[in-house]
Image: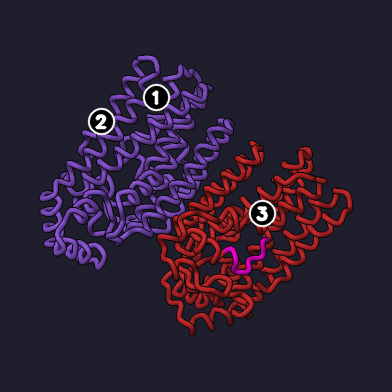
Chain colours: A purple, B red
Amino acid sequence: MNQLILSKAGSDVQMIPEVANHLISSGGKRLRPMLTLASASLFDYRGENHVKLATSVEFMHTATLLHDDVVDESDLRRGKSTARMIWGNQASVLVGDFLLGQAFRMMVDVGSLDALDVLSSAACVIAEGEVLQLSVAKNMETTEDDYLSVIRAKTAALFAAAAEVGPIVAEAGRSGRNALKSYGMNLGLAFQLVDDALDYGGKAADLGKNVGDDFREGKITLPVILAYRRGTQDERAFWRDAIEAGNSSDANLEKALGLITKYGTLSDTIGRAVHYGTIARDALAPLPDTAWKSALMEVIDFCIERVN
Amino acid sequence: MNQLILSKAGSDVQMIPEVANHLISSGGKRLRPMLTLASASLFDYRGENHVKLATSVEFMHTATLLHDDVVDESDLRRGKSTARMIWGNQASVLVGDFLLGQAFRMMVDVGSLDALDVLSSAACVIAEGEVLQLSVAKNMETTEDDYLSVIRAKTAALFAAAAEVGPIVAEAGRSGRNALKSYGMNLGLAFQLVDDALDYGGKAADLGKNVGDDFREGKITLPVILAYRRGTQDERAFWRDAIEAGNSSDANLEKALGLITKYGTLSDTIGRAVHYGTIARDALAPLPDTAWKSALMEVIDFCIERVN
């Protein structure tokens, strides 16, 4: 798969592999495409098409990251300057479009209309989730349910699709597809919840980005939603000033971290992740006990216990 | 098709139809999707799938426009403020991604792997063309051949794909596909050549954008390439200063227009368009004479004689 990723990021237009490989070789976890490989293998798939679909999934993810960095005006990703800081917003948008195109070409090459249906639907849902996130940004009245709708669409939908195309390519039945889709969806929710906790509770060196990026961008994530809802009237006024009015100074970030600690909202956010992890685990439970199943179970623990 | 365009631009996330309809309802010519409808009808297609593919084509085009306006930092398109000026770069990038996703979903819904192959390949080539355009920007040594590579990829490839999926959905044979693909490719080249001439020779009121936008962006198009190559040493120094160093004041635009007139490069650019228009015409020539064929022939004249 790594070979295919590198070869399909190639182009006669030199800037394309430069920009694409900057991100592709930056030590991403390859978590989503591994879900595709493992979930196909779980159903004894023996061909090569799962590698193409896994590469498609990784390209969809990489395209999203390139576009996200433009949307969020981010400087750092995985401990390196973002592509937009080196080659500009223009190249990031267009190389993202190229990778998305390549992703679809590989899916077409596989020739499964079911896999195409699942992945193209996910592409729409992801974009909807990103737009939804924009429209709830800087709004402290966002509920946990609103937040869940955002992360279900922008993150979990691709995990779900990545896991579901495994049984599809292996020509497993409907119950296998449903099990893996449910596993992926709930794993994705757990993954994003932990991600959002790490943004306030991680170490910059582990994260490859700065602590408090979400705070500075006015992104509403669960640690903040809970601290706001549990806070006093004065504390809620502080959050509105910091997030809605954008007063995200370092001093205010310190104060925010204090309130997050006061109300224990990081551990509660992790608690929510554990909840979804349990659902993911039970989704796989009825399947035969194999090494692949154990691997997929371990991924749940990895996602919840990770530090980056 | 217009109904399907409006319905598929819909989403529960309110900002999506707002942004999408701003551009979709701004009086675009619907030229590319009409090629799909006409080229399917040319082969007596009687179903509904050509409408879905035409809508996919228009969405691919609309997504490109939304991303282009971000890449080019444009203020005006079709006489209205660009989406990015109203809703920001973020929404333009993400709603473009959404429309691209919807385009693929509709293609998948049609279920033709051949049509999916042609259109997903076009999506890659278009992005490559846009990146290529970025990398030759502000480089006065760009040749007419380099320029042709750019417009073939960024514009003509979608015209070719739009025309080719007509015979595909109508299950016409290989020669029909090849004829329509060649027609579309050459029509697209003619279209873009005229577009680039209009940028220097049109009227702002007709264009819906400002005369000289390409000049100010340092875009290298044929009217400039020819004027540079035919110019004196002093005139070539002027072009390098204006385009490469970015001294694109109104006074310099006036001077550039003077040189373009001096060397007759607008009429020569139109001459090239006529050349490709002739190839498009001959590509269709062997097909039976029907009202649809006449309509496709008329499109060639329209593209060459248009004022916007």
Disc 3 and disc 2 on one polypeptide chain: no
Identify the residue at horizontal 42%, vertical 39% (top origin).
Answer: A158
Q: Quadrant of residue A287?
A: top left
| Residue farthest top in this picture | A289
> Mark on residue B159?
3
> Mark on residue B186?
none
Residue A21, relative to residue A74: is it above or below? above
Q: Is residue B27 magenta?
A: yes
- Quadrant of the drawing holding the C terminus of chain B: bottom right
Q: Position of residue B209 (x, y in %)?
A: 56, 75
Q: CA distance from mark 3 to mark 2?
A: 48 Å
Question: For mark 1, what is the residue?
Answer: A38
Q: CA distance from mark 1 to mark 2?
A: 15 Å
Q: Judge depth for marks 3 and 2 and give the one in front.
A: 2
**Residue A2, can we see it?**
no
Identify the residue at horizontal 30%, vertical 38% (top origin).
Answer: A191
Q: Judge depth for marks 3 and 1 and give the one in front.
A: 1
- Quadrant of the drawing holding the N terminus of chain B: bottom right
Q: Earlier in the sequence, mark 1 or mark 2?
A: 1
Residue A199, relative to residue B204: is it above or below? above
> Mark on residue A302?
2
